[in-house]
């Protein structure tokens, strides 16, 4: 049923006069109640008895079986100070407050006021024939307060006792004079009936409210903050959020909220515990020790607070943040406490976790095809530094996460087992952008093994104090040293524990180097696999830190590390906290080379880092070329730049013609080519003109005198092929291309391997071959980085394929480009 917001939806139950009331078969809290007017009591139904001759028979009962012949077996739950019932016979003036089955309609008992113990009970009861009822949906604090006022006004028994509430606002109240909400389930934990449900502790059924519980001596005993989340969950009927108080990453002290769906529930933030401490002593280092009980069990938390309510030394009173905690000793920060060599006989304290509250939703429903997105919120997100006895609303929602499809049951197999998370206690340095070292403190290894304490001594031995390298995994692989004098890649012979023995190379002596071990066979994990595994880890209540020399990090308490933005996997975008280092950058090592364009890392300064864009293109060779791949003299192919630099202007003219020699001028356009930079035009370099009004001026030239470029923008050049040049005034848009194809300066395109190589070779028997190109950083021949690269592909066979060329194409920022070479059948070649 829905949440109750109207006081008229609550009830103490319909009043039934019980004639000839009797109590028998008493055994502890169990007995039999009978009366001539007692009918229709259902199993597990709650009701209250008033007016019994023996006071101990008054109170709250639950039926253990349905009534039969004006009699019902029951268990006494509360009332008369908790006294067990006693035998009584034939009393009059007794009333039953409960479900009046004879009424039309009937009314359930959903509220019980135990004035003996000053407890307010909410009773979760439902009946299809009743006008009221209470379910897990609960009741607002305002509705319960309003109902209580009405009952104190109308109930002659209640008005004899102190009124429970002081209302500050509809969502902020105090329970006074020792009144509290009942804590705990019903006495027997009796289970579920057909249409009646088991009771749950009252505090968990209060909605839209926070309150304090103040005893008769005006001492604050407990404080509850109302937690409300804003937004829907992916499955409101099943997904349960959780919360944490304190900030100890190595201990799972998180708590699930009581009910699924968006949260509207109160939690304890202050709890006065003056006893069960034994002898308390305070040391000069602000350590408070006890001899009885446990600080941890009582609810004190690292990062939370302790409020000293009483002490032998009045100056110690106050609230302190807890910096360390064990069962017997907690240490606080701030104002020094008084050093006491003897026990503090007056010491009394309270758990005070008002200062830390994180609310999270992280769910993987086993029946769903996809997982759910994560979300979290905290005090800073809502602009407060502490909670108190009112409602606090946190934005929190989740939705279907299409990037998660693996079930938890399948996460313990490859490639997911390749993926580990390391929270370092220092800086991990790596080059992401060319020539720039970036720093991180959290690393996600994908089949790799990274560290921050590498030591080399100028020999083939490389060591790490972490000493967690699994034996044989990296034998035959590669050691990458990311920084220092030994920076580079080295072949591994063997690696195990804390020692790497190199097969080749002797890195220069260094200590504290960031390094990564790569296996001979890389992991096949996709970016989606990496994301799925990390999200799985962040839902665990166990240690997920795979760095051996730092302490535990409980998954559920760690911040989110990854997110997909479209197809790009971002690491560290949410600025996660590393509890063991001030840095919060996240890097991924060992991901597939094919994914390099789809990852981004945020470093320790919060700056987004991306790898140079690696363009990929595939060349397909037609059957004639493939046929020559098996010939004695196999066919070959080449990928050239059509040009590397193009300079275009409408001020370019051609004059001073002398045979094939001419002076090419461009006062504005060509002066940029004068100098010594890679893109500048030098003597004896070749260039191509195109776009000339006179066709004979288009073609390949060789520069013979560039001294005028930096001044007037003039170059003297010799036209090496085609018709001799003729005079032409400026006007048309003319382009001057450097390193042009069909010239001695034509450049082969280099790939993006560790040591870039020319893209050329023999025609493959497979008929296709793929290549990578550093789109972001390639500067061959003065090329402008991060721009499309015009290319020409040429191939020639022997017995089966004629010469073929593909031009007018370019390498773009793309990973799916394809080019096809179609050579005519060779019918004239003879060896």
Image (cartoon, rainbow, N blue to C red):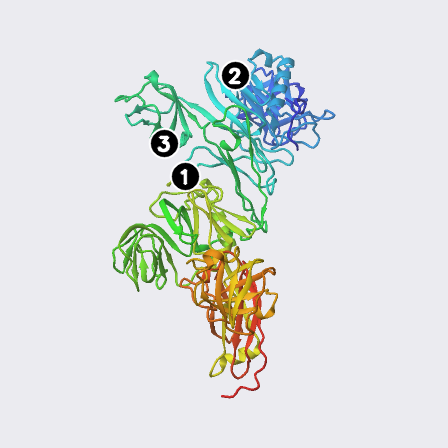
Question: Which-is-in-front pick, marks 3 and 2?
Answer: 3
Q: Is residue 218 visible?
A: yes
Residue at 27 percent of width and 56 percent of height: 508
Q: Earlier in the sequence, mark 3 or mark 1?
A: 1
Q: Real-space Cα distance between discs 3 and 2?
A: 33 Å
Residue on which disc 1 sits: 249
The one of 309 and 258 positioned closer to us in this rendering = 309
Q: Position of residue 206 (x, y in %)?
A: 58, 27
> Where, quadrant-wise, is the N terminus in this rendering?
top right
Which element is circle 3 on?
strand
Question: Which-is-in-front pick, marks 1 and 2?
Answer: 1
Q: Earlier in the sequence, mark 3 or mark 2?
A: 2
Question: Looking at this rendering, what residue extends furthest in the right direction?
Answer: 104
> Mark 2: few, some, or many residues within 10 Å (few <14, many ≥20)?
many
Which element is circle 1 on?
loop
Instruction: Verify CB contact (< 8 Å) between mark 3 and mark 2.
Output: no
**Numbered label attached to residue 176:** 2
> Mark 1: few, some, or many residues within 10 Å (few <14, many ≥20)?
many
Q: Position of residue 504 (x, y in %)?
A: 30, 64
Question: Looking at this rendering, what residue extends furthest in the top direction?
Answer: 160
Task: Choose top left, top right, bottom left or bottom right for residue 60.
Answer: top right
């Amino acid at each position: 049923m829905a949440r109750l917001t109207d006081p008229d939806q609550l009830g103490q139950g319909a009043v039934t006069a019980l004639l000839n009331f009797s109590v028998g078969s008493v055994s502890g809290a169990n007995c039999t109640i009978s009366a001539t007017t007692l009918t229709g009591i259902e199993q597990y139904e709650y009701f209250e008895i008033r007016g019994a001759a023996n006071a101990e028979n008054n109170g709250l009962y639950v039926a253990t079986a349905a009534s039969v012949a004006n009699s019902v077996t029951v268990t006494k739950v509360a009332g008369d100070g908790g006294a067990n019932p006693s035998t009584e016979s034939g009393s009059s003036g007794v009333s039953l407050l409960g479900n009046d089955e004879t009424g039309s309609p009937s009314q359930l008992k959903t509220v019980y006021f135990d004035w003996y113990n000053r407890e307010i009970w909410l009773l979760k009861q439902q009946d299809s024939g009743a006008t009221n009822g209470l379910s897990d949906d609960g009741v607002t604090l305002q509705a319960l307060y309003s109902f209580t006022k009405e009952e104190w006004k109308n109930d002659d028994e209640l008005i004899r006792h102190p009124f429970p509430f002081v209302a500050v606002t509809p969502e902020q109240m105090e329970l006074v004079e020792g009144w509290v909400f009942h804590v705990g389930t019903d006495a027997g934990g009796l289970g579920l009936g057909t249409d009646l449900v088991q009771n749950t502790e009252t505090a968990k059924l209060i909605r839209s409210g926070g309150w304090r519980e103040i005893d008769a001596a005006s001492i604050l005993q407990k404080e509850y903050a109302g937690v409300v989340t804003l937004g829907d969950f992916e499955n409101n009927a099943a997904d349960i959020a959780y919360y944490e108080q304190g900030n100890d990453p190595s201990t799972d002290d998180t708590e699930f909220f009581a009910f699924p769906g968006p949260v509207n529930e109160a939690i304890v933030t202050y709890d006065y515990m003056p006893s069960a401490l034994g002898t308390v002593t305070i040391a000069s280092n602000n350590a408070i020790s006890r001899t009885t009980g446990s600080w941890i069990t009582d609810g004190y938390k690292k990062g939370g607070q302790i409020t000293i309510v009483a002490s032998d030394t009045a100056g110690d009173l106050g609230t302190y943040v807890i910096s360390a905690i064990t069962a017997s000793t907690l240490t606080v920060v701030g104002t020094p406490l008084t050093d006491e060599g003897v026990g503090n006989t007056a010491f009394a304290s309270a758990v005070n976790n008002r200062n830390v509250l994180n609310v999270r939703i992280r769910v993987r429903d086993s029946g769903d095809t996809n997982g759910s997105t994560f979300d979290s919120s905290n005090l800073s997100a809502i602009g407060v530094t502490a909670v108190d006895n009112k409602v606090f609303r946190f934005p929190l929602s989740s939705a279907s996460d299409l990037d998660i499809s693996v079930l938890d049951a399948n996460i313990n197999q490859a490639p997911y087992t390749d993926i580990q998370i390391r929270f370092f206690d220092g800086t991990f340095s790596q080059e992401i952008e060319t020539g720039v070292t970036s720093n991180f403190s959290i690393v996600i290894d994908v089949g790799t093994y990274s560290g921050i304490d590498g030591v080399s001594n100028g020999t083939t031995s490389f060591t790490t104090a972490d000493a967690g390298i699994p034996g044989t995994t990296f034998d035959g692989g590669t050691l990458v040293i990311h920084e220092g004098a030994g920076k580079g890649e080295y072949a591994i012979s063997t690696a195990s524990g804390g020692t790497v023995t190199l097969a080749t190379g002797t890195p220069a002596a260094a200590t504290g180097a960031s390094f990564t071990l790569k296996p001979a066979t890389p992991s096949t994990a996709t970016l989606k696999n990496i994301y799925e595994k990390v999200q799985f880890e962040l839902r665990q209540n166990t240690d997920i830190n795979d760095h051996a020399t730092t302490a535990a990090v409980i998954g559920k308490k760690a911040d989110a590390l990854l997110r997909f933005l479209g197809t790009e996997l971002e690491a560290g975008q949410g600025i996660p906290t590393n509890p063991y280092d001030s840095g919060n950058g996240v890097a991924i090592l060992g991901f597939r080379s094919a994914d390099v364009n789809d990852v981004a890392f945020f470093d320790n300064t919060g700056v987004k880092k991306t790898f140079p864009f690696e363009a990929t293109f595939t060349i397909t060779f037609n059957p004639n070329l493939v046929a020559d791949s098996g010939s004695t003299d196999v066919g070959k192919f080449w990928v050239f730049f059509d040009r590397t630099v193009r300079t275009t202007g409408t001020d370019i003219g051609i004059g001073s013609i002398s045979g094939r020699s001419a002076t090419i001028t461009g006062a504005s356009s060509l002066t940029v080519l004068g100098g010594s930079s890679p893109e500048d035009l030098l003597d004896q370099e070749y260039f191509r003109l195109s776009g000339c009004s006179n066709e004979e001026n288009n073609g390949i030239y060789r520069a013979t005198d560039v001294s005028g470029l930096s001044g007037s923008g003039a170059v003297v050049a010799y036209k090496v092929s085609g018709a001799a040049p003729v005079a032409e005034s400026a006007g048309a848009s003319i382009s001057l291309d450097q390193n042009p194809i069909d010239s001695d300066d034509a450049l082969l395109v280099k790939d993006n391997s560790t040591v870039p190589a020319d893209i050329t070779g023999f025609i493959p028997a497979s008929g296709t071959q793929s290549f990578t190109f550093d789109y972001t950083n390639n500067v061959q021949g003065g090329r402008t980085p991060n721009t499309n690269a015009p290319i020409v592909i040429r191939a020639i066979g022997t017995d089966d394929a004629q010469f073929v060329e593909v031009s007018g194409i370019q390498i773009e920022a793309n990973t799916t480009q394809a080019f096809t070479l179609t050579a005519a059948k060779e019918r004239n070649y003879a060896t």
